[in-house]
Every structure is written in structure tokens, then in C-alpha cells.
Amino acid sequence: MKKTIICFGVREYEIPYFEKLGKQYDYELVLRPEYINDSCYELALGYEVVMVRGGCPLGRESMRKLAEGGLKYYLTRTAGYNHVDVEACKEFGIETAFVPGYSPNAISELAVTLSMMLLRHASYATDLAKQGKFKVTNTMFSREIRGCTVGILGCGRIGCTSASLFKGLGAKVIGYDVFVSDRAKELMEMKSAEEVFAEADILVCHMAYVKGKNDRFIDKGKIALMKKGSIIVNVARGEVMDTKAALDAVKSGQLDGLGLDVVENEGKLFNKEFDPANMGDPLFQEMVDLYPKVLVTPHIGSATDLALVDMIEVSLKNMDEYLATGQCKNSLIK
């Protein structure tokens, strides 16, 4: 008999991939578009296996009730897992696992795209074209990437992929990480965090978020070290950046551009629609008002075909491993 898994946060374009992989791995997948949270946890009652994505936070009480209702496995098809209450899972005997890696190119390509859009002021130019204005302005004058230094914060698989892509465009690449791999040292010159901030024309953040360790790592003080007119792109986690400090730096001219695929408290913003003139939050309002110097995408770094297959497939393999051995190498419970 097929094992049933209820999957939350499934977007319309993802359905064919879930269906194909469900058949391939012999699972019955129940696909729900809702992002499960404490207000709708009842949707998962009665299921032994739940699969979620980022933006699906469940608190301790919800996890307790789901465990009482039969929940045994809680899978997240993401590399980040700050939305998973690991301690609650452990307390209530729920096995939980994550996807430690998926297509690094998906995130890196978005990082390069946002960087180049800001460097070449492409959004500014196309926005004017939409208004019927086709004159070349002073703002359209740009530097070339081969004359820039790109600083990478977080030099794991994704950081190294970005370094490779930027080097392919001719940029000088430097990096900072607490743990430095041989691959990172081959691709970029490793420096202190302060040196990377001071030397980078474009700063790209791929830094994993460790609560209590690197909260708001990119802060006002470090941004002040940067060259006037530099660019920051964050495609990692919103919690590692002081968003207000970065927006202030854009307003002052310290930063020429800011690209964000992640923001602090993004659950209040992403997957929702607002009146752009009345965002309801001063921080979000500033982000919108500062376009096109601030470019925001709604956490789409992993929204590619190959990354999606990786995330679903590894999650199903995690389930296979649990069923076969009672354990999983990607377990979040240590």
C-alpha cells in the first residue's frame, strides 16, 4: 500500500513535478496550496507524513496536536529550516528531515541577475521605456562587471557557484566564511569580513542563518565600511541583514542598489498582495518606494525546474530512508 504524504505550499506550476515524482517513488501525494501555520494546522490532522516548504511555521502546540492526531514524519523540502520547531518534533517523537542542498545554480543565477540589473540600472531604464521615455540619462551610465570586485559572504556550494559565475563574467571575486573549503580557496581570495565589506563593489550574501550567532550580520557598521555607490544582494536569509540599515544606506547614497530575495519577517510580506501606496508596514513601504534602486523578489531563488526536482526528490528519498532503516542522514534531530 502506498504511503500518503500531504504536501503544503504547492504552487500551480509545481504540480506536474510532484505528480511525476510521486509516481516514480511510489507515494500518494496530497497537494495543498496553503502554507500551513498555527491558524490552519488542522489541515494536516490525521496524516502520518507532512511535507512543507519555507514559510510554513508551526508552533509547539500545533505540533503536539498533530502528533496526537498521528503525525510521525515532518519533512521540509528546503535547506533552511528555521520554520521547523525541531525541539517540538523531538519532544513529541516526530522525525524531521531537511534537504541539505539542491541546485546551487538556481540561487546563484538569481544573485547574478539582480547584481547585473542593479549595476547596469536595467530596471530603471526599462521602467522609463514603459513610460514612453527613451532618452539616455546620466543614471544609465554604468560600470562593467569586469572592472568590479564581487564579495561573497558564505562560500559553500552556492557561494562557490556564484563565484564561478562572476569570474566567468570577468569580475574579481573575494570571499568570507567561517569555514573555508579547498574549493572556495581555488575560486576566490578569502579575506576577513571587514576586508570583504571594504573592498567589494558588489556584495552577495549566501550566508546561512544561525539564530543567535549571525543575526543582522550585515549591519549599519559593516555597511559603512563599503565604498560609496556599492551594491548589496541578499539571496540567503532575511535575518542575516539589518534591512532598515541597508535601506537607509540606499537613501543616503552609500549604496547605489539593493537586491533582496529575502527580507526580515518576510512571512508578513511574501505570498500576499498589497496596495503599493499603502503597504501597512514602514519598512515594506520604504522597500517599494525605493524602486528601482531597491529590487525585491518574493523568495524565488529556488523557483527553477532543476531545483524543484532536487527538493522534492531528496524529500522523498528522506522518507524512503526512514521507512527502510528508521533513520535518515538528513535528520534535523541530533
Image (cartoon, grey):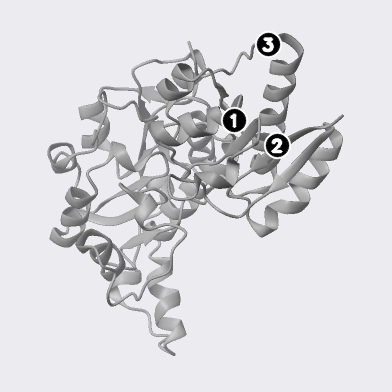
Residue 225's image quarter? Answer: top left
Residue type for callout 1: Leu
Report x, y in % for residue 145. Answer: 42, 49
Residue type for callout 3: Gly
Q: Element under label 3? A: loop
Say which residue appears at 49% left-offset and 33% top-offset. 65
Residue type for callout 2: Ile
Task: Report the side of 156 relative to 32 (left or right).
Answer: left
- The residue beneath circle 2 is 5
Looking at the rendered image, the disc whose residue lies closer to the viewer, 2 or 1, is 2
Image quarter (top left, top right, bottom left or bottom right) of the N terminus: top right
The span from disc 3 to disc 1 (Cα, nearest Å) is: 14 Å
- The residue beneath circle 3 is 326
Q: Residues within 10 Å of mark 3 (few under 14, many from 20)?
A: few
- Disc 3, disc 2: CB below 8 Å? no
- The residue beneath circle 1 is 75
Q: Element under label 1? A: strand
Using the rendered image of the protein, determine whether residue 159 is visible from the camera's viewpoint: no
Which labelled disc corresponds to residue 187? none
